[in-house]
Image: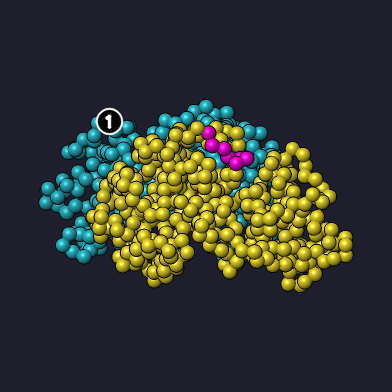
Chain colours: A cyan, B yellow
């Protein structure tokens, strides 16, 4: 994405800011400079916001990522349809500048509250609900070409990590080999100025869907026996968890191997880890892991592992609809193995959860299923 | 609660089990021995399950905890109404014995799947859904007089901890002063054989409602400046988090000071931390912290802190209903200060979230609000 920063900026970034922050402040000041210079020249201030719609999303097959097209929409100040959003964008830009300069971060909700007030002399609120606030932040992300995390805004932290790696978190050395049953909490912001990687013996990352499954693998010290890192994202992994996995993949060249439920939700989680979400294509290049692998649970496992009736949960109508939608995602649509996988799920007529494997023994999943599949490199990509 | 363990047990617990586990196995074997000895004497096997109803819940004002009354209900095998539950209770008891003897733990969902199967020669499932399984585990808790965690069954882990303490988690030394921005993930099972406390300088625990608020306090290194431990439970704290807070309170004599939203949900969270949930009175003595303190947000803060309109969120009809219900809880009903607090919330007509305090400045909550209230010992109990 093109940088909007300008050397014409009337206000230089504060000294002492770190590289990434200095860059972001430059972009913010560039945005403000354009607005003010147009105003001073007697022209209407306007912001050009790249369009975050599905129609402006391009599947870049060669690179294996989603990216945004060139579509932009203007947000002029003197237009009843956009004046409110113009004001909101400026308010959030101002909060972000304050956050970066103070060296602090804020939650999405905090940013909303920071900007929320009644406009003097009116009964009009700048923001009524957070639902109005979050999309404006996404607009700023794409307009500035900076991730939300680079704007110093975080979401709820979710997920844990243990394994054969040392992580430096805000200067503290986290020895993930000695994190007991609880593990290290994966923060919401894991950019390189906050999180660095120290010594790492691990050869891959095993990412599981739920905290309860993670606890099973951790209790059986799977990461020690198989020399890996073990993570979970408490369901659909939040951006912090995905970004961390991407950095482990790109910087340390570790394969990311997922163990998720055999149902459309599990497939969707894998899809988001692999390619990002279609409606948020702008984040794809910073969050997607095109070479992530789906190890299981596979639709064939019912027969192959000789599982009992007890593991079956009937597919609902909505599951069937979702399965067909996911099968049509561009990265699955042209992949014969994924087409077969989803077809077999639909033919089976039932889904299976990772936890159902306990039916074959408490540690069947950690001692038999995953090791065998790893050895055979039996996974989908 | 009376122990059901018997020296008449035909099967001694396996050697090598730790104290707590040995005790639990004794109780399990005692239960089984009673069933089998009645059978061998030609009598109908029956389990006596303490009643987990509100009517069998007693508010012990002197001790400041909820406890169960003497009510029990019989669960005979030869009764169409209870035969299924009898079988389910035995199945889960058997899974728990297997877990303890293997030195492993399982999730609630895992225990459900472990026991779920089709009864041979019939189309009858032992369990149809997890909704049927969880209450049977609660029955076992009260029947055996053992917490779920002592039965080796865990739930989702939620919440994080940082601060001036060293925690030993399964033999790993967690220096909570060096846990970066992520913190240590609080496990679901924090019983003394898993989690021990090492060196602790902290003088109190600050427990906040949400991970996002926790991140604000951690970023500002509140725990370092005020020599405390900082925890959150991602909303209503799960049992692991509550039990850990109780242990910090009872064993290390640390006051537990809560910063929660000023709304019925915040009050309810405080109530559960303080006294436990009315419908699960049996856990109260092992989880409740009668002397926990509610520091804020207080209904008076709108005026006292000169907050703007922006912090107000209108109370809904359901909020008003919940506020009145909570005001009637025995530990609030006789407390004049709590009555005033809830009345003022209702008079205000609006609720306020901790995160709204950002309106007064990014770090107003950590640098001004909480320190001032702590100094003045201005809290509710």
Instruction: Find residue B169 and report its image quarter.
Output: top right
| Front residue (pair A338, B125) | B125
Mark 1 belongs to which subunit? A
Q: Residue at x 48, y 35 (%)?
A: B200
Q: Quadrant of residue A214?
A: top right
Residue A212 as seen in the image, left or right of residue B97: left
Dot 1, how many residues are within 10 Å of its Cα: few (below 14), some (14-19), or many (20+)?
A: few
Can residue A16 be spotted in the picture?
yes
| Residue A146 is one of the magenta-drawn residues | no
Q: Quadrant of residue A377?
A: top right
Q: Position of residue B350 (x, y in %)?
A: 32, 64
Q: Position of residue A297 (x, y in %)?
A: 65, 50
- Position of the N terminus of chain B, as image quadrant, is bottom right
What is the span of residues highlighted in magenta in the rendered image? B192-198
The image quadrant where one finds the C terminus of chain B is: bottom left
Residue B256 vs residue B354, the one in the foreground: B256
Residue B202 position (above or below residue B299): above
Q: Which residue is mark 1?
A: A16
Counting from the top left corner in percent of width and height, residue B142 is at 65, 58
Q: Is residue B195 magenta?
A: yes
Q: Position of residue A229 (x, y in %)?
A: 57, 36
Of B194 and A85, the residue lying toward us: B194
Q: Is residue B117 above or below residue A242?
A: below
Q: What residue is at 29 percent from the left and 58 percent from the top?
A: B300
**Mark 1: secondary structure:** loop
Query: In the image, what residue occupies the spot 32% across and 54% down?
Result: B356
**Picture residue at 72% right of the left edge, 44% below the top:** B22
């Amino acid at each position: 994405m093109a940088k909007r920063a300008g050397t014409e900026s009337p206000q230089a970034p504060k000294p002492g800011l770190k590289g990434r922050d200095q860059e972001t402040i430059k972009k913010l000041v560039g945005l403000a400079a354009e607005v003010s210079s147009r105003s001073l020249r007697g022209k209407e201030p306007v912001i050009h916001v790249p369009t975050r719609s599905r129609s402006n999303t391009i599947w870049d097959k060669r690179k294996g990522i989603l990216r945004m097209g060139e579509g932009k929409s203007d947000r002029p100040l003197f237009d009843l349809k956009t004046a409110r959003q113009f004001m909101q964008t400026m308010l959030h830009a101002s909060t972000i500048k304050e956050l970066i300069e103070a060296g602090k971060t804020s939650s999405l909700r905090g940013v909303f509250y920071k900007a929320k007030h009644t406009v003097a002399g009116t009964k009009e609120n700048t923001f009524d609900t957070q639902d109005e606030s979050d999309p404006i932040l996404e607009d700023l992300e794409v307009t500035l070409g900076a991730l939300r995390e680079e704007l110093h805004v975080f979401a709820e932290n979710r997920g844990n990590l243990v394994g054969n790696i040392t992580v430096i978190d805000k200067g503290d050395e986290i020895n993930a080999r000695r994190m007991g049953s609880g593990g290290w909490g994966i923060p919401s912001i894991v950019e390189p100025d906050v999180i660095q990687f120290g010594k790492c013996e691990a050869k891959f990352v095993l990412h599981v869907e739920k905290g309860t499954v993670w606890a099973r693998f951790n209790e059986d010290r799977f990461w020690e026996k198989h020399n890996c890192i073990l993570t979970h994202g408490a369901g659909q992994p939040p951006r912090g968890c995905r970004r961390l996995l991407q950095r482990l993949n790109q910087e340390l060249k570790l394969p990311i191997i997922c163990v998720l439920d055999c149902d459309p939700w599990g497939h969707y989680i894998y899809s988001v880890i692999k390619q990002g979400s279609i409606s948020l294509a702008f984040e794809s290049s910073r969050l997607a892991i095109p070479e992530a692998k789906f190890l299981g649970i596979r639709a064939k496992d019912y027969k192959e592992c000789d599982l009992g009736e007890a593991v079956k949960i009937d597919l609902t109508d909505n599951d069937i609809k979702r399965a067909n939608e996911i099968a049509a995602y561009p990265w699955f649509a042209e992949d014969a193995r994924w087409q077969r996988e989803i077809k077999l799920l639909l033919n089976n007529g039932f889904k299976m959860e990772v936890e159902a494997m306990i039916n074959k023994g408490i540690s069947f999943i950690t001692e038999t299923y995953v090791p065998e599949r790893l050895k055979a490199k039996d996974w989908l990509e």
